[in-house]
Structure formats: structure tokens, C-alpha cells
């Protein structure tokens, strides 16, 4: 009976360690995906800020050939710059790409591996409890 208890305790420990390893692997992968997503969003935000600054630059074009002097082009109102940058700037596309790649990376995590890890943890707990109960009798 003692060899069976040792075997059951060993199986419980191995199941729990294996299941925890699979779950930890999935958690680390999800954290990496989230860190990459945040980095991509920060990059998009920097691009948006640069685009807003470019929209604020006063532009003029020389019109000397026509004898008109310098022609000043209209400026974009400061309140409209951020809205315009969100609508037509490169940052909106970068944010969509970041979100798409994040969602695809999250779904790339194997559901089978995740639930196998959870099942191994539960099986290890049940085996450990059974072993404990058998050792009492």
C-alpha cells in the first residue's frame, strides 16, 4: 500500500507541476503580447504627435513667377489638428494594425494547451487528495 501511495503522490506532484508549467507559459505569452501591443500603441501615439506638429507648421509657397510675391496657404485651426490627425493621419492605421496583431496573437495561444494545463492541475489536486485520504486509513 505504501508504494501505491508514493506513486499516487508522485503522480499528483508531476501533474501539478506540468499543469502549472503550461498555465505559466500561456500567462507569459499573454503578457508578451500585451507588452508588444502597448509598445505599438505608444509608437502610433508618437506618430500622431508628429503629424499634429506637421499640421501646425505654417506653409507658404513662392508666387514670384506671377508677380504676386509670397502666397500664404491657409492654416489648420489648432482645435481641428488632432481630429484631422485621427481621421487621415498614419496613426489610425498603426493603431488598427496593433489591435489586429494583438488579437491574432492572443488567439494564437493554444486553447488545447491552456485547458490541458488546467486539467492537469485539477487532476493533480484530486490525486493528491486521494493519496492523503488513503494514507489516513
Image (cartoon, rainbow, N blue to C red):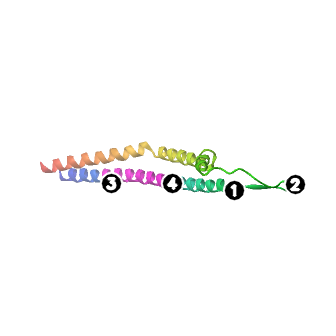
Asked if the magenta segment contains residue 32, the reply would be yes
Q: Which residue is mark 1?
A: 58
Q: Residue at x 33, y 47 (%)?
A: 120
Residues at marks 4 and 3, CA–CA distance in whole angstroms: 28 Å
1 or 4: mark nearer the eye: 1
4 or 2: mark nearer the eye: 2
Q: Along the polypeptide, which appears first: circle 4 or circle 2?
A: 4
Where residue 59 appears, as percent x and y from the top left, is 72, 55
Q: Residue at x 61, y 54 (%)?
A: 52
Callout 1 environment at 10 Å: few (<14), some (14 to 19), or many (20+)? few
Q: Which mark is residue 17?
A: 3
Q: Quadrant of residue 115?
A: top left
Residues at marks 3 and 1, CA–CA distance in whole angstroms: 64 Å
Residues at marks 2 and 3, CA–CA distance in whole angstroms: 80 Å
Callout 3 environment at 10 Å: few (<14), some (14 to 19), or many (20+)? some
Q: Which residue is mark 2?
A: 65
Q: Which residue is mark 4?
A: 36
Nearest the eye: 49 or 31: 49
3 or 1: mark nearer the eye: 1
Q: Along the polypeptide, which appears first: circle 3 or circle 1?
A: 3
Callout 4 environment at 10 Å: few (<14), some (14 to 19), or many (20+)? some
User: Pointers 4 and 3 in contact (CB under 8 A)?
Assistant: no
Span highlighted in magenta in the image? 15-36
Q: Along the polypeptide, which appears first: circle 1 or circle 4?
A: 4
Callout 2 environment at 10 Å: few (<14), some (14 to 19), or many (20+)? few
User: Pointers 1 and 2 in contact (CB under 8 A)?
Assistant: no
Amino acid at each position: 500500500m505504501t508504494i501505491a501511495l508514493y506513486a499516487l503522490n508522485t503522480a499528483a506532484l508531476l501533474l501539478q507541476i506540468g499543469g502549472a508549467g503550461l498555465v505559466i507559459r500561456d500567462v507569459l505569452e499573454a503578457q508578451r503580447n500585451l507588452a508588444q501591443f502597448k509598445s505599438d500603441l505608444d509608437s502610433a501615439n508618437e506618430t500622431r504627435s508628429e503629424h499634429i506638429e506637421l499640421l501646425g507648421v505654417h506653409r507658404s509657397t513662392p508666387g514670384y513667377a506671377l508677380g504676386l510675391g509670397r502666397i500664404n496657404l491657409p492654416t489648420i485651426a489648432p482645435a481641428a489638428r488632432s481630429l484631422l490627425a485621427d481621421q487621415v493621419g498614419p496613426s489610425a492605421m498603426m493603431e488598427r494594425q496593433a489591435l489586429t496583431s494583438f488579437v491574432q496573437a492572443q488567439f494564437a495561444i493554444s486553447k488545447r494547451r491552456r485547458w490541458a494545463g488546467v486539467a492537469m492541475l485539477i487532476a493533480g489536486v484530486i490525486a493528491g487528495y486521494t493519496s492523503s485520504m488513503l494514507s489516513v486509513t
